[in-house]
């Protein structure tokens, strides 16, 4: 499955964002949020996430074990930059 997320269209704090993505990772076929720009069944066993946050783009390819780990730990601890706790909502590009 492929999922494209744009965190810039949502003004929730980081802990809420991580909990929201965690719910999706635990149940990918039954959860969708406003920051999801694309969800596509690509026939792969791997879950591919492209996350855009602030000026950063994150690409993650997760097997089932990694998906469960990320769901519990939160995605921000798996990236190589400091994800701000608070942020301002920006307009969704057209």
Image: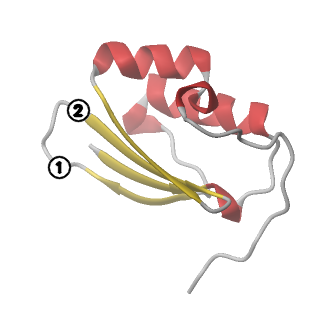
Q: Is residue 52 above or below residue 23?
A: below
Indicate which disc residue 25 carries. Answer: none
Q: Is residue 33 above or below residue 9?
A: above
SS at badge 1 = loop
Which is nearer the eye, 15 or 76?
A: 76
SS at badge 2 = loop
Q: Quadrant of residue 52?
A: bottom right
Image quadrant where one finds the N terminus: top left
Q: Position of residue 93 (x, y in %)?
A: 59, 81
Residue at the front extreme, as displayed:
80
Residue drawn 63% across and 32% down?
76
The residue that disc 1 covers is 42
The residue that disc 2 covers is 46
Residue drawn 77% across and 31% down?
15
Give the number of marks.
2
Which is nearer the eye, 61 or 44?
A: 61
The nearer-to-camera label among 2 and 1 is 2
At label 2, counting other C-alpha atoms closer than 10 Å, the crowd grade (few under 14, some 14-19, many 20 or more) is some
Answer with left or right where residue 44 lies relative to residue 16: left
Image quadrant where one finds the C terminus: bottom right
Q: Position of residue 64 (x, y in %)?
A: 30, 18
C-alpha span from label 2 to label 1: 9 Å
Residue drawn 61% across and 25% down?
77
Q: Is residue 75 above or below residue 53?
A: above
Residue drawn 15% across and 38% down?
44
Q: Position of residue 12 (x, y in %)?
A: 80, 47
Answer with left or right where residue 83 lies relative to residue 45: right
Residue at the left extreme, as displayed:
43
């Amino acid at each position: 499955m492929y999922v494209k997320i744009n965190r810039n269209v949502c003004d929730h704090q980081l802990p809420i964002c991580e909990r929201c993505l965690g719910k999706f990772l635990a149940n990918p076929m039954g959860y969708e949020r406003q920051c999801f720009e694309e969800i596509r069944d690509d026939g792969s066993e791997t879950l591919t996430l492209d996350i855009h946050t602030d000026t950063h783009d994150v690409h993650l390819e997760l097997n089932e074990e990694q998906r469960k780990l990320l769901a519990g730990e939160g995605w921000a601890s798996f990236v190589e930059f400091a994800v701000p706790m608070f942020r301002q909502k920006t307009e969704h590009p057209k």
